[in-house]
Amino acid sequence: MIVAIDGPAASGKGTLARRIAADYALPHLDTGLLYRAVGAARLAAGGDLGDVSAAVAVARTLDLAKFTEEALKAGPVGEAASRVAAIPEVRSALLKLQQDFARQPGGAVLDGRDIGTVIAPDAEVKIFVTATPEARAERRLRELLDRGETVTFDDVLADIRRRDERDAGRGAAPLKQAPDAVVLDNTLLDKDQSWLVAVAIVERRRAETGT
Ligand code: DC
């Protein structure tokens, strides 16, 4: 069974994907980490984030093991990831790795922006997780403050809106709901409630598809 979980920044799709993967004993790939790693490497090199050939070279030889999740989740890396993710050649360089992960025997859970539309259009389960920008900013703010970063709600909200616009407005594999995805709006739900809704969606699709 392939479970595709897509949604905008800080929608809680990563937490959901990890939990669903554990419940069904499936391997999980947070595909945002791939774009974050490319962005982090370009930031570390001090180069121009719009430099296509430099970003593509990083994507082609990407080794996620060289990055800690902590470093990849830092505030400025999200924005850098969104910039390099808009480069079609960077997306192509990361395509096979993601498709191979999705198609491994037994299935997998992947979360990102284009899993249900581009990476695994044949996924048995597609969930589009979303919440208002304000609710997402509130959650991301708490995360960043817990990590010791100095940020304000307004900064985080502006960052989320900018990323939403870029991720949804780009030509290459934009963030959008697959026509056959089930929407899970968790603006008014806590993590456990979101998870219960997601499990119900998975179970319904398992019954429908016989997986
Ligand atoms: O999910 P995230 O915030 O970790 O993702 C970081 C950025 O990577 C996001 O702004 C857009 C990009 N991304 C993408 O374009 N496609 C994916 N499948 C996953 C992430």
Image (cartoon, grey):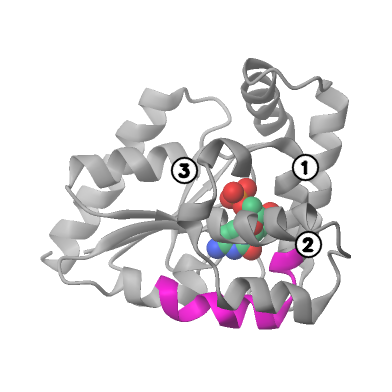
Q: Is residue 147 above or below residue 75?
A: above
Query: Between residues 134 and 84, which one lies in front from this camera angle?
Result: 84
Amino acid at circle 3 = Gly
How dense is the environment of label 3, judged by Cα within 10 Å: few (below 14), some, or many (20 and up)? Answer: many
Q: Could you tell which of marks 3 and 2 lies nearer the N-terminus?
A: 3
Q: Which residue has dot 1 on it? A: 76
Assign ligand 1 to one image quadrant: bottom right
Amino acid type, residue under disc 2 in the picture: Arg
Residue at 63% x, 75% y: name it. 173
The reply to whether discs 1 and 3 touch (Cβ–Cβ < 8 Å) is: no
User: Nearer the observer, disc 1 or disc 3?
Assistant: 1
| Image: 2 above or below 69 | below
Which residue has dot 3 on it? 14
Span colored in magenta: 84-98
Q: Which image quadrant: the C terminus?
A: bottom left
* Residue 175 drawn at (x, y percent): 64, 63
Q: Amino acid at mark 1?
A: Pro
Residue 96, quarter of picture:
bottom left
